[in-house]
Image (tube, rainbow, N blue to C red):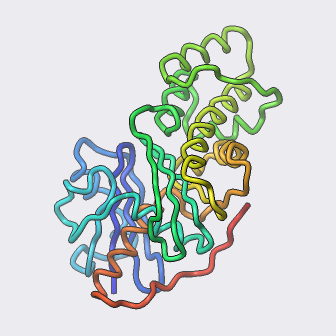
Amino acid sequence: MIVAGCDVGSLTAKAVIMDENGLVASAVALAKRSPEESARAVIDRALKDAGLAMTDVAWCVGTGYGRKNISFVNSVESEIACHARGAVWQAPSARTVIDIGGQDCKAIKIDAAGGVARFLYNDKCASGTGRFLEIIADALEIGLEDLGGISMKSTKKITLSNQCVVFAETEIISLVNDGAEIPDIIRALHNAVANRAAALAKSITVEKDAVMTGGVARNAGMFEALKNALGCELLRVENPQINGAIGAALMALDAARGAGGGPVPRKERALVD
């Protein structure tokens, strides 16, 4: 039985093809002008990689901010529920999920089945989100994907005093003009984002094990900054960026099986502290 999950976010769209044995294929693409266009582009890519067609898919669940504008899905689910479900599938011991997305940050407390016990999210301010990193990377003329490696070369701790993106950008330019080293500035940027995300998570109480999801989790420097800000161990899952799409696909499996279906099988995964 083939199912799919499609997660359309503000910056990227993600698709997962899954069967009862686990992941079959996945794809990530930059968001296009409309959620429908983004969703079709990314699901077509994932299906092509899997050697399948949409007619082979028994059920497709949409999630993300654009979920209500995807015409080909059978049902939709909130991104909170999908991130919770995907996190427990990837890391069965997970009880807290911190998802740093392009335009928001979510802190989710979950149970052993991947159900949502409590959550908070911040989508009102860019600080604490991937957008903050993107804006500063552009200001420094550095590729977003290069931030992590550069920050790991930092030798001096400095602090950004401004949380507002506009003022922080001005502060960073001043630091550059004053001769501050780029790795130290980027490390300070990571710490600023991590502190906002950690404060959100601590407000609902961080329970072990904590995991970080979202595309920002691929940034090694950001991962370390969040781990330090939380003051506890943080698990690295294998597929952080497509976690929401994985959760959507798992819900698609449930729907395809019908009510009273058995547990979703999962492969063993190595988790890195």
Q: Against 142, is 236 above or below?
A: below
Q: Position of residue 206 (x, y in %)?
A: 62, 55
Quarter residue 211 falls in = bottom right
**In which image quadrant can residue 195 be found?**
top right
Question: Picture quarter containing residue 256?
Answer: bottom left
Q: Is residue 42 left or right of residue 99?
A: left
Quadrant (top left/top right/bottom left/bottom right) for the C terminus: bottom right
Whether 26 is drawn above or below 113: the answer is above
Tell me residue 258's x, y (percent).
27, 87
x, y (%) of residue 72?
A: 19, 65
Which residue extends farthest right?
155
The residue shown at (33%, 90%) is 260
Residue 246 place in picture, x, y as percent: 43, 68
Quarter of the figure that contains the N terminus: bottom left
Please name whichever residue, 33 or 130, is drawn nearer the observer in this view of the structure. Answer: 130
Q: Residue at x 49, y 24 (%)?
A: 165
Tell whether 96 sits left or right of 23.
Answer: right
User: Viewed as shown, does residue 135 lie left or right of 17?
Assistant: right
Identify which residue is drawn at 37% across, 63% down: 15
Residue at 62 percent across and 72 percent down: it is 93
Q: Is residue 102 in sight in this rendering? A: no
Q: Is residue 84 left or right of residue 178?
A: left
